Image (tube, grey):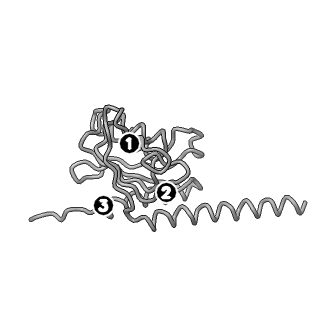
Amino acid sequence: MQTKKKTPEFYMRAALAQARKAAALDETPIGCVIVKDGQIIARGYNRRNTDGSTLAHAELTAIRKACKRTGDWRLEGCTMYVTLEPCQMCAGALVQARMDAVVIGARNPKAGCAGSVLNLLQNPDFNHQVAITDGVLEEECRLLLQQFFRGLRERHKQMRSQTDQR
């Protein structure tokens, strides 16, 4: 019996499920999965506020788990699927981990380092470059973030209004 090959959309939906876990914690909804040989070997979601750590990005959590699972800091042969373009810290970690590729849902024009602000993943001066695919389930990824920030702005507005009434 032949198994059906999973699509990039399948893995991005798994990353979106992780992003929804972050949103449930009132964290910025960013999620990712790392895939090797067609199998998800690690998952991560944003927990910066929950953990009180700048380092608690979805990508770094997943990289840490993938390294533990594989027993190696090199993640050659792996692809990361992430709902939002990685920042400079996470892009650097992808290069350092020797990740083969990253698949991005939505671009991050304010802080993305896979081509939006900088492209750290494909800098020819580094000893490793990471292949980039973007726009996979872009609308779903973008809408999840937009809804989260719209809700956050509304909550802040309500809190200011309540403070002004006192």
> Taking 129 as reference, is 117 left or right?
right
Secondary-structure class at tag 3: helix
As displayed, is residue 102 above or below residue 2? above
Residue under the point 48% across and 38% down: 89
**Closer to the camera, 58 or 106?**
106
Q: Disc 1, disc 3: CB below 8 Å?
A: no
Q: Position of residue 158 (x, y in %)?
A: 76, 64
Residue 157's quadrant in the figure? bottom right
Marks 1, 2: nearer the viewer: 1
> Taking 117 as reference, is 124 left or right?
left
Mark 3, Cα crowd under 10 Å, few <14 / some 14-19 / many 20+, is some
Q: Position of residue 134 (x, y in %)?
A: 38, 57
Separation of disc 1 and disc 2 at Cα? 27 Å
Return the mark for residue 8. Answer: 3
Separation of disc 1 and disc 3 at Cα? 19 Å
Marks 2, 3: nearer the viewer: 3
Return the mark for residue 21. Answer: 2
- Amino acid marked by disc 1: Leu
Residue under the point 57% across and 66% down: 147
As displayed, is residue 1 above or below residue 60? below
Q: Position of residue 74 (x, y in %)?
A: 29, 34
Q: Earlier along the polypeptide chain: callout 1 or callout 3?
A: 3
Count of numbered marks: 3
The residue where tag 1 is placed is 121
- Amino acid marked by disc 3: Pro
Residue under the point 64% across and 64% down: 151
As displayed, is residue 93 above or below residue 2? above
- Amino acid marked by disc 2: Lys
Secondary-structure class at tag 2: helix
